[in-house]
Image (cartoon, rainbow, N blue to C red):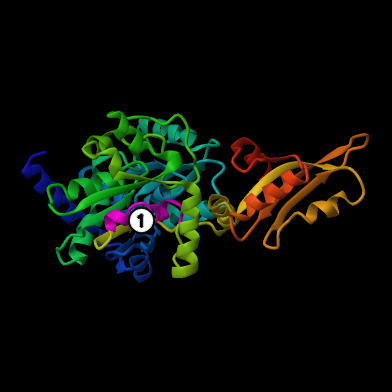
Amino acid sequence: MTADSLSDFRARVAASTEALRQLFPATPLQRNAYLSEKIGATVYLKREDLSPVRSYKLRGAFTFMRKHIASAGKGAHFCAASAGNHAQGFAMACQHFGAKGRIFMPVTTPKQKIDKTKMFGGDAVEIVLTGDFFDECYAAAKAYAASGAAEMAPPFDDADVIEGQATIGLEIEGQMGGKLPDVLIAPVGGGGLAAGLTRFFEGREGMRLRFAEPLGAAGLHASLKAGRLTKLPRIDGFADGAAVAEIGTLNFEILKRHSPQSVTLCPEGRLCQTMLEMLNVEGVVLEPAGALSIDSLRDLREELRGKTVVAVVSGGNFDFERLPDVRERALRFEGKKKYFILRLPQRPGALRDFLDLLGPDDDIARFEYLKKTSREYGSILLGVETGDAQNFRVLMERFAAKGVKVEDITDDQLISDLIV
């Protein structure tokens, strides 16, 4: 990339940033005392969760739409496929520009997300529910755009979208008085934000870019490791805002200069720990993808010690109906909750004897016992929570001493998904 083209890109980002001020002021850059003390660094959070749609996605959708309308004129018709943050940003941009928009969403999209998208878009948007999964509604949106009925507003793989997401970089630069952080951490899903920041800060000495991906959807890490764009055969969709099987083609062209070591892989269970920690300690509501940058601080602690760090908090659209699942995943990751299948003799007093094996901090979270006639043993599905993960070692020793046949199914994904 030539110096002139880089200069042009930064100039376009500056113009896009100024245009965004029609909708909202720069999102806050806040020093976080709790994380700073915990990591031993000066940690700032770039609070994209405080944008009007509680995510950074509005930036890319607005920029794409603004530039298309500038060339095509008013009366443009747009379409998009999304069940989350992109849909809400798209809807608000349609409302702002008075443009008609059609949003394709999976039939399985929670009503809360549909209602929020309607709220941001008003009469400007039409929501079409189609297919059970994102890939199906994405195909429907592409087919609609291919018919000539609308212009497709992509969620991440587009030069204008990348430019819009790069406005975060310009804001950070201004909010720090022109002095860059030692390390800037950004989450990665489709790669639009990461690509925008990479281009904006290209050639700037003294700052390292680090990226955070969910362990179950690490498309950028896989592509960098392979040296080519790679599509994951399967993904864990828990961190839905970043659960993308393949990052954008244009985005990878920009990001391929980074090494695999620049990407931190965040286990989904640990993300849940981080979400609960930030909620309980700081009162900050994060969606799973929005917790990625903060969660990665755990792995980067040694690298960051004594440094100035900015972590991009990408979104806070969290449905509190998911809170029990978040707590469940966090406890299992910490080793404080396990599920067992065990066999219990079918004799009077056997259940009482079994309960005596539990320790004082062991709490039964689930218990299902099926007594069968003409059999010596019955089966139990047992869920146990405890205050210390080491208590399970003691419990297993007690089971063994009493001859209790037990199988730990906590990490058996198939069985766990069926019963938990």
Quarter of the image where one finds residue 326: bottom right
Front residue of this view, candidates 105 and 51: 51
Q: Which of 305 and 21 is in front in this view?
A: 305
Residue, disc 1: 297
Query: Is 413 situated left or right of 53 in this image?
Result: right
Q: Which amino acid does label 1 sit on?
A: Leu
Whether 203 is drawn above or below 137: the answer is below
Read off the magenta span. Answer: 287-304
Q: Which residue is drawn at 75% across and 39% down?
A: 405
| Quadrant position of residue 96 | bottom left
Q: Where is residue 318 in the image (x, y as percent from the top left)?
A: 49, 57
Q: What element carries label 1?
A: loop
Disc 1 crowd rating (10 Å Cα; few below 14, some 14-19, many 20+) is many
Q: What is the x, y in percent for residue 237?
A: 49, 42
Q: In this view, does 12 lie to the left or right of 58?
A: left
Query: Which residue does the image show at 79% across and 56% down from the upper left?
Result: 356
* Quarter in which the N terminus is drawn: top left
Q: Is the magenta stretch mostly helix, strand or loop?
A: helix
Q: Can the viewer see residue 164?
A: no
Work out whether residue 9 or residue 43 is closer to the camera in this orientation and state it: 43
- So how many labels did they put on this image? 1
Residue sticking out furthest to the bottom: 33
Image height check: is 262 above or below 273? above
Tell me which residue sits at (72%, 49%) in the image: 398
Q: Position of residue 82 (x, y in %)?
A: 44, 44
